[in-house]
């Protein structure tokens, strides 16, 4: 029987909405709009949303020109 080691995913820091608010100085509503428009991709843990630190940092660095309430597919 051959045993293949399982690969663990790289550790990423997950941020709460409150932490993202403090870090970016954006309102809670704007963060949710960024999520709905597809600019941020949250991780769901139960009912809670968490955001990857590297994705938030990239968003801050590159910026967003518009936030659409209904993203186009």
Image: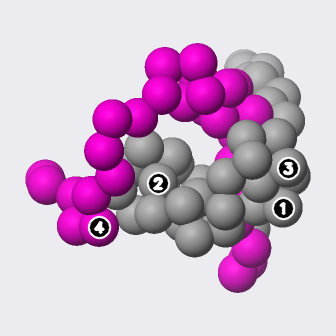
Residue 22, numbered circle:
3
Q: Secondary structure at mark 3?
A: helix
Label 1 Cα neighbours within 10 Å, binned few <14 / some 14-19 / many ≥20: some
Provide residue 32's location: percent of width, then percent of height: 54, 66
Determine which residue is flagged by label 2.
Answer: 34
Picture residue at 33% right of the left edge, 35% below the top: 65
Whether residue 15 is visible, yes or no, is: no
Determine which residue is flagged by label 4.
Answer: 69
Mark before the other along the chain sequence, 3 or 4: 3
Provide residue 37's location: percent of width, then percent of height: 34, 56
As measured in the structure, the alpha-carbon distance from the residue carrying label 1 to the one carrying label 3 is 6 Å
Looking at the image, is 48 positioned above or below residue 67?
A: below
Whether 13 is among the magenta residues is: no
Mark before the other along the chain sequence, 2 or 4: 2
Occupied quadrant, residue 69? bottom left
Part of the protein shown in magenta:
46-73
Provide residue 50's location: percent of width, then percent of height: 73, 57
Determine which residue is flagged by label 1.
Answer: 18
């Amino acid at each position: 029987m051959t045993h293949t080691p399982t690969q663990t995913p790289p550790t990423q820091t997950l941020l709460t909405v409150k932490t993202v608010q403090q870090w970016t100085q954006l309102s809670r509503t704007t963060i949710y709009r960024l999520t709905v428009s597809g600019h941020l991709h949250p991780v769901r843990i139960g009912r809670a949303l968490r955001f990857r630190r590297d994705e938030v940092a990239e968003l801050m660095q590159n910026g967003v020109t518009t936030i659409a309430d209904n993203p186009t597919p």
